[in-house]
Amino acid sequence: SYELTQPPSVSVSPGQTVSITCSGDKLGDKSVCWYHQKAGQAPQLVICEDRKRPAGIPARFSASNSGNTATLTVSGTQAMDEADYFCQAWDSSSVFFGGGTKLTVL
Amino acid sequence: EVQLVESGGGLIQPGESLRLSCAASGLSVSRNFMTWVRQAPGTGLQWVSLIYTDETSLYADSVKGRFTISRDNSKNTVYLQMNNLRAEDTGIYYCARVLQYYFDLWGQGTLVTVSS
């Protein structure tokens, strides 16, 4: 089994920049994607580290991955960005998700 | 409109079986990799199973030997047959399309509750 670790929660003021981390053994060797899930809704793809962002996801979302840590950065955070964020990676023909980080926009 | 609609969830007793369906529109399940992901109440996401276009499949260790993923091309539907259900299988089950290594399109989910 492969473990991905995320902080349970982060908070940010509107207009500020916030980063959410995802840690795993040699994670930098893998392709990592991020999803967000708003209350009562299904998860939605936000971005993959190679900057694959689906239509409708704004450019203020960016991602990076190196060493043992992948990072999702939200620049100019807006109230609508408040959600749970999950990282995802493949390992040994299985898919793993991080435990999720609740982003609160204060 | 491209969408996935899950159905088949419900309340079921431990040890019993249930089959979930994921009906696709606007895309062909036979030409896409498809997957199931579940979410226990108040917790995170857990990958369950995936079916490739050649119908080979992958499973999480927690469901291997109990769950089977399949598809019916004529109905454009993916299924998840769940046998010998346990309380820890309780959760919302989402169907999603797989592109390369990411899940780009998700259904709204169907709730499975395993309880006596």
Image (cartoon, coloured by chain):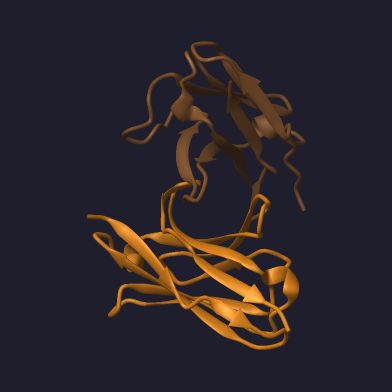
Chain colours: A brown, B orange
Query: Where residue B46 sits: x, y (%)?
Result: 64, 56
Query: Where residue B19 sits: x, y (%)?
Result: 52, 82
Q: Is residue A102 left or right of residue A74?
A: right
Residue drawn at x 42%, y 68% as measured from the top left: B6
The quadrant where residue A9 appears:
top right
Q: Is residue B106 left or right of residue B73?
A: right
Q: Is residue A3 left or right of residue B29?
A: right
Res B55 visible: yes
The quadrant where residue A71 appears:
top right
Residue drawn at x 60%, y 29% as measured from the top left: A103
Residue drawn at x 49%, y 11% as measured from the top left: A15
Q: In this view of the protein, which residue sits in the foreground, A50 or A96?
A: A96
Q: Is residue B72 left or right of residue B87?
A: left
Q: Residue furthest top?
A: A16
Q: In this view of the protein, which residue sits in the foreground, A96 or A39?
A: A39
Q: Is residue B35 above or below residue B69?
A: above
Q: Is residue B8 above or below residue A17?
A: below
The total of numbered circles placed on residues is: 0
Q: Residue furthest front?
A: A106
Residue drawn at x 54%, y 68% as measured from the top left: B111
Query: Where residue A33 sits: x, y (%)?
Result: 54, 37
Q: Is residue B97 above or below residue A78?
A: below
Q: In this view of the protein, which residue sits in the foreground, B1 or A30?
A: B1
Query: Where residue A19 sits: x, y (%)?
Result: 62, 20
Res A50 visible: no
Quarter occupied by the C terminus of chain A: top right
